[in-house]
Image (spheres, rainbow, N blue to C red):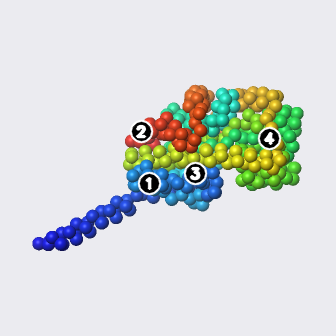
Amino acid sequence: MMTKQGTAIFTGMALATGLWAGASAAETLRYAHGWPAQSAIGEATAPLGDLLQSYSDGTLTATVYPGSLLSMGELPSGLRDGIADIGGVVPVYAPSDYPITNMLSDVAMLYEIQDAGDAIVPAFVGALMDFVINGCPECVSEFDAMNQVYTAGMGAPRYLLTCTNPVTNLDQLAGSRVRVAGPQWSGWVEELGGRAVSLAGSEVLQALSQGVVDCAITNGAELRGLGLMDAVTDITAAPLGIYGGALVANVNRDTWARLSADQRRALLRAAADVSAAAIFNYENEAEANLDAAVERGITIHQAEGDMVEAALAFIEANVGGLPELYGNAFGVENGDAIIARFIPVMTRWAELTQGVETRDALAELYWNEVLSKVDTNSYGL
């Protein structure tokens, strides 16, 4: 028969073992993205492990791999194959795998006509999040085919004309060689009389310095990252739109399936925080860079009326041509109907994001309006 002392020792050992097992029960997920650790995205995603621990009552955490486990180009297939559990995917790196998502991303320029004001990035990211999850079964199927579950997005700040001479009207743009950041901007430049030049980001500074190009279309956050302030003399704010199609926390479907419904909910809550942080970090970086540009003597211009008018006309025509473009190139069916369903969602989010001035307020908006309403017993399964 066990003595009272022996019973106490046994009970203490059992309790300690139980506590140790509980403490070690948290599953560590691998989160990969292709940005540097010190970038706007790197700093926004760094707390993901702590966020997951908090929202999952200690049952989940994450190790973040910034720009190491998988590169930008490797992330779509690497996340599909389970090399990472969660990933920051940029769909333009895999156009044939995410054609509908990329088509919808190109619709972001329409906010220059709808006038989402300073909230253009938060509004578009929220609209895309809302639409993919609640109104676009074609989008969900696209992610299913990549063995991924969509959760939340992010976007870069407004794009600008950064030049080595003033370019504020159509006469000044005519014949100018302009580095473009994507096909929609190629069309913008060509339609307005310039000559589009495709260059990798790493080549832009040298191209501007050596006169290979006269301007580059880029966002304010990249002014320092690409070293452009060493070459640029003039920056023009024009109706160039944004890129809002990045996916900040796609989840491998096998990982998603093995999590409990509560853990999936915790992941969605953390994704809302990371999405908002990434957007605000990017915007703050862009503002700081533009302030620094002014201090260095770079002149900031507003596009003149003829450029604005021509740009808006291009945007309206370009959005109308996207279904045919993506249909011919990638076999997207019913693109016109998909975009027609998406535009009212964009209008709603332009209104929802007005007056949202902090990262926490944006995270709460994404959570309350979209992600908290996801049925984690069925979504993505």
Q: Residues within 10 Å of mark 4 (few under 14, many from 20)?
A: some
Q: Earlier in the sequence, mark 4 or mark 3?
A: 3
**Secondary structure under badge 3?**
helix
**Residue in the image at 54% along x and 40% along y:** 361
Q: Which residue carries the number 2 mark?
A: 375
Q: Earlier in the sequence, mark 3 or mark 1?
A: 3
**Residue in the image at 44% along x and 54% along y:** 53
Q: Which residue carries the number 1 mark?
A: 53
Label 3 to label 1: alpha-carbon separation: 16 Å
Q: Amino acid at mark 1?
A: Gln
- Residue 3 position within the rendered picture, expressed as x and y whole percent measured from the top left: 14, 72
Q: Which residue carries the number 3 mark?
A: 44
Tag in front: 4 or 3: 4
- Residue 298 position within the rendered picture, expressed as x and y whole percent measured from the top left: 82, 46
Q: Which residue carries the number 4 mark?
A: 300
Q: Which dot marks residue 43?
A: none
Q: Is residue 141 visible?
A: no
